[in-house]
Image: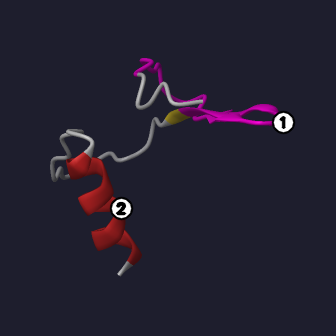
Amino acid sequence: MKVKKLRMNYQQKDIKLKKTHGEHSGIHLILVTPDGLDGAADKRREGTVRLISNNY
């Protein structure tokens, strides 16, 4: 149920998701919180940065 809810939330924000086969890693993430920044990166991959929301 959580996945379906997340998918609907992304679609409402016009974020396109696509089903893929094979490698699913390589995610880099920076989370902006009221207390500062938190983040993680898969160092096995080179990544790109995309702004999901600027409502912080």
Instruction: Tell me: 4 left or right of 2.
Output: left
At a point 18% along the width and 50% down the height, the residue shown is 20
Q: Nearer the viewer, residue 52 or 24?
A: 52
Image spot of residue 35 (x, y percent): 84, 36
State the quadrant of the N terminus: bottom left
Spatial CA distance of label 2 from label 1 is 24 Å
- Three-letter code, disc 1: Asp
Please tell me the numbered disc located at residue 6.
2
Q: Secondary structure at mark 1?
A: loop
Q: Secondary structure at mark 2?
A: helix
Looking at the image, residue 45 sits to the left or right of residue 40; the answer is left
14 shown above or below 45? below
Q: Residue at x 57, y 35 (%)?
A: 42
Residue 4 visible at all: yes
**Which residue is painted at 16% across and 53% down in the image?**
19
The disc, 2 or 1, on the residue closer to the chain's N-terminal end is 2
Instruction: Indicate the position of residue 13 as horizontal and vertical percent values.
Output: 27, 42
Dot 2 crowding, Cα within 10 Å, few <14, some 14–19, many 20+: few
Q: Is residue 43 above or below residue 7?
A: above
Q: Is residue 42 magenta?
A: yes
Up-down: is 17 above or below 39? below
**Rendered location of residue 4, percent (x, y):** 28, 71
* Highlighted range, magenta: 29-50
State which quarter of the image contains the C terminus.
top right
| Amino acid residing under circle 2 | Leu
Numbered disc in front, either 2 or 1: 1
